[in-house]
Image (tube, rainbow, N blue to C red):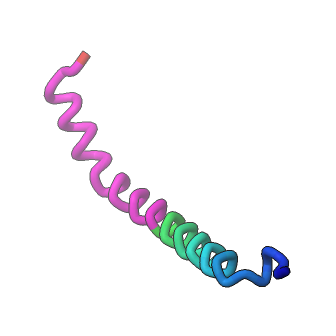
Amino acid sequence: MKIVYELDVYNLVEKLSDLVWCDFDKWKKRFKIVIEKLGPKLNAFINSTKIG
């Protein structure tokens, strides 16, 4: 009987997990850049609409 670490499925899931986390880290950086660019425009829009 194989140990869990020896199974192909385990190895594939481990690789997939690494790819997902890598993309998530990149997404956070992209999101930060977009927010920094849109921040002033978004604040101006919110202030001009007098929401609240």
Quarter of the rendering occupied by the N terminus: bottom right
Q: Main secondary structure of the magenta part?
A: helix
Q: Residue at x 33, y 58 (%)?
A: 34
Nearer the observer, 34 or 5: 5
Magenta segment range?
Answer: 27-51
Q: Up-down: is 6 above or below 46? A: below
Determine the residue located farthest toward the left in the rendered image: 49
Q: Looking at the picture, how far across and down is residue 38, in whole percent?
A: 28, 51
Q: Up-down: is 49 above or below 37? A: above
Which corner quadrant of the image does residue 6 belong to? bottom right
Nearer the observer, 44 or 32: 32
Determine the residue located farthest toward the front in the rendered image: 1
Quarter of the rendering occupied by the C terminus: top left
- 12 left or right of 1 in image: left
- 39 left or right of 24 in image: left
Which corner quadrant of the image does residue 31 belong to? bottom left
